[in-house]
Amino acid sequence: MNNRWIIHVDMDAFYASIEEREDPSLKGKPLVVAKDPRKTGGRGVVSTANYIARRYGVHSAMSSSEALKLCPKAIFRFSGFQLYRAVSQQIHNIFHHYTDTIESYALDEAYLDVTNNKLGMTDPVQIGREIQQKIKQVTRLTCSIGISYNKFLAKEASDYTKPAGFTIVSVEDAPAFLAQLPIEKFRGVGKKTVPKMKELGINDGSDLLKLSELDLMKHFGKFGYSLYRRARGIDERPVEASRVRKSIGRERTFGPVLDSEVVVNTQLRLIAAKVIKDVAKQHKHGKTLVLKVRYQDFQTVTKRATFLDYIENNVDNYLEITSELLTNLPPVEAGVRLLGITLTGLDDLNYENLALNLF
């Protein structure tokens, strides 16, 4: 499938960049996109941080109170997902000018198959340049573009020179590009895998190429199968315009109803533990956590929190997020008869653990 042209568009520090656009005085300062923990009693979760704040170790999905400890001079700002979604829609409108074969992974990230595009353009570089320029003109935001013959390489290319990067990896260029790529940059190679790689003498793509498929599967299980192919630039996954949004969740109905925050949090902890167990069994992780609450009068409300990094699968982290979501709901003292937690936006744990340098 080397005759395809796929563009990966990755917005640069999307939420943070929108906040800086709305308030230019934030530029040049450490910015955390979250509610200020000093005003919320320490509660809150980081959606993203700009590049300056990230130098202090602040990252998506950590508690805002921890972010404050790491970066005491950080400015906390959160204008809301209504604004972020509106800007994302502007960007997707630009995509649709060229193709409807679009696979979105978050508000700020998408794959576009432009092999057979609406305008009959034969040069993917021209398409990529136009998209990057139009996004800048319409939104006043920058993005990084990666172009290649498959999704894996297109994503690697967009991540290669951020921010405002533009990288093309052709069939001819792929072997050299992958050979020099640090092993930490390969999709799916996370912090826990890197030490094992180093022990095996795998420091970059050229080292990875030396190992047989059997050796890689011996050391890394099913992920070894993927690594063998990625080292050779093989990825036959199509851009799925109608990508199904999968989810894993649990809910529980109560009788008598729950009427205190302590009891509700206790039950949420139990439900979160079950969801995490199910997620672990399926070897998944996700970017969106959904809280469902049904009250004594049968009013049912759902709230969700979406991150650009995959949410860390532990109970305390889930509770931090659900507690934040609860603050925007009617008081639990009104009587709660059902609670539910669902993780959506799922991908395989072996898949692209996109710790976006945006958020």
Image: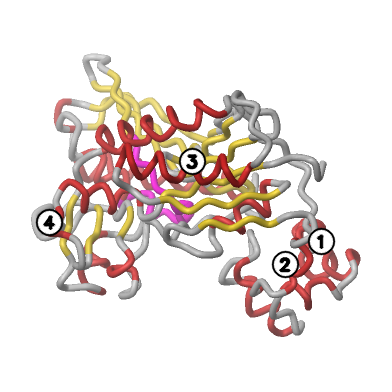
The numbered dot on residue 130 is 3
- Amino acid under label 3? Glu
Amino acid of disc 1? Arg
Q: Is residue 53 above or below residue 225?
A: below
- Going by the numbered disc 2, the residue's amino acid type is Leu
Bounds of the magenta span? 304-320
Task: Say if the magenta span includes residue 312.
Answer: yes
Does the segment drawn in magenta span residue 116?
A: no
Image coords of residue 114 (percent x, y): 64, 34
Q: CA distance from mark 4 to mark 1?
A: 51 Å
Q: Nearer the viewer, mark 4 or mark 2?
A: 2
- Which mark identifies residue 178? 2
Q: Are marks 2 and 1 in contact (CB under 8 Å)?
A: yes
Label 3, label 4: how many angstroms apart (C-alpha)? 46 Å
Q: Residues within 10 Å of mark 2 (few under 14, many from 20)?
A: many
Helix, strand or loop at disc 2? Answer: helix
Q: CA distance from mark 1 to mark 3?
A: 30 Å
Which of these two is toward me, 192 or 244? 244
Q: Decide which of tag 1 and tag 3 comes sooner along the chain.
A: 3
Residue 51, picture quadrant: bottom left
Farthest-out residue, left: 39
Residue hosting label 1: 232
Q: Is residue 11 visible?
A: yes
